[in-house]
């Protein structure tokens, strides 16, 4: 079998050339990083779980008519996605104060915000992904005013869907981040949800106990990250009926 062409490798995923023009294969790794990769580890099975969970969420968006890059899952670690030009921003949606917002503003973690708050950070690891105001984004040409209006609308639709799904299984969606891509249909450009949606990119707390079921488990040394992600998958019905044993990572080239 011919070796596939690697397009890009990030901290948690690798992108390969897809089988058809305009497609990519997205491979989910077991690597875990925090604090801009200052803390690193390999967590067995993490990539398998994130692949399945991102498939679940992206399929849900598709069913609601929210455009995204997901086409289909190929195997335990890979999915076929639509190739797009990534807008160089992380779009952060916050429903409750936590993490950096609590530190910046002195708001107690878990405080419900008066409404969902959307923040933007410039995607640059060397700079620490700094928060940027909308004025910077438009001035530097990262996105137009129309793009920003569309991005905010997309982010709020994703928030409505994710909040409802999580609440239904006893999980509070504290915050999450998404990335946005540009795709062209002829001369017409549109924006779609890209990258992934998984516990790597969300803060998820059990509604009753407050137990963290996201990457903060790794950031703060709160226990087994795999157990936390498995619990999210179990509640959503993503795991096979015979349980986590079937989720052991399998490399398929």
Image: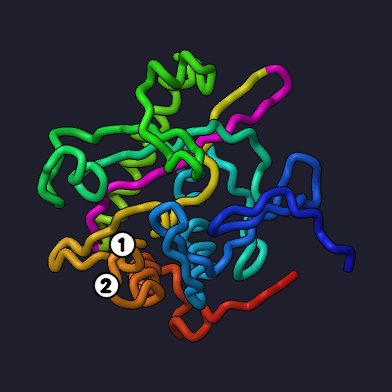
Q: Position of residue 90 (x, y in %)?
A: 44, 38
Q: Residue at x 73, y 54 (%)?
A: 16
Magenta-span inclusion, residue 175: yes
Mark closer to the chain start, 2 or 1 = 1
Q: Is residue 128 left or right of residue 45?
A: left
Please say if 127 is above or below 34.
Answer: above
Look at mark 1 in the image and give the residue it sits on.
Answer: 216
103 left or right of 141 in image? left
Residue 159 in which image quadrant: top left
| SS assignment at label 1 | helix
Quick one: label 1, few (<14), some, or many (20+) residues within 10 Å? Answer: some
Position of 162 relative to 52 (above/below): above
Tag shown at residue 129:
none
Of 36 and 146, nearer the camera is 36
User: Is 145 above or below relative to 83?
Assistant: above
- Please state the extent of the stretch shown in magenta in the rendering: 170-187
Q: Position of residue 248 (x, y in %)?
A: 54, 81
- Which quarter of the figure is the C terminus placed in? bottom right
Front in this rendered view, residue 175 or 35: 35
Q: Quadrant of residue 157?
A: top left
Q: Is residue 198 visible?
A: yes
Residue 80 in view in this figure: no
Distance between mark 2 and mark 1 Cα atoms: 8 Å
Q: Position of residue 133 (x, y in %)?
A: 35, 23
Residue 138 among those drawn in magenta: no
Number of numbered discs present? 2
Contact (Cβ within 8 Å) of mark 2 with mark 1 = yes
Residue under the image location 47 percent in, 57 percent down: 37
Q: Residues within 10 Å of mark 2 (few under 14, many from 20)?
A: some
In the shown orientation, is residue 107 left or right of residue 248? left
Q: Disc number at residue 222?
A: 2
């Amino acid at each position: 079998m011919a070796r596939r062409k690697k397009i890009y490798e990030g901290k948690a995923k690798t992108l390969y050339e897809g089988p058809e023009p305009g497609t990519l294969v997205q491979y989910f790794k077991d690597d875990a990083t925090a604090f801009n990769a200052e803390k690193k580890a390999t967590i067995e099975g993490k990539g398998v779980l994130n692949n399945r969970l991102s498939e679940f969420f992206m399929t849900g968006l598709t069913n609601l008519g929210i455009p995204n890059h997901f086409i289909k899952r190929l195997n335990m670690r890979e999915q076929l996605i639509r190739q797009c030009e990534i807008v160089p921003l992380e779009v952060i949606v916050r429903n409750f104060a936590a993490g950096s917002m609590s530190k910046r503003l002195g708001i107690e973690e878990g405080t419900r915000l008066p409404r969902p708050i959307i923040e933007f950070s410039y995607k640059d690891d060397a700079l620490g992904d700094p928060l940027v105001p909308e004025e910077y984004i438009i001035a530097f040409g990262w996105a137009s005013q129309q793009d920003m209006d569309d991005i905010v609308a997309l982010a709020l639709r994703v928030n409505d869907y994710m909040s409802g799904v999580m609440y239904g299984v006893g999980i509070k969606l504290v915050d999450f981040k998404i990335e946005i891509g540009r795709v062209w249909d002829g001369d017409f450009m549109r924006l779609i949800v890209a990258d992934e949606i998984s516990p790597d990119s969300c803060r998820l707390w059990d509604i009753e106990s407050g137990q963290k079921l996201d990457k903060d488990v790794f950031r703060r040394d709160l226990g087994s990250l795999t157990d936390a992600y498995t619990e999210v998958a179990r509640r959503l019905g993503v795991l096979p009926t015979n349980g986590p044993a079937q989720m052991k990572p399998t490399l398929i080239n």
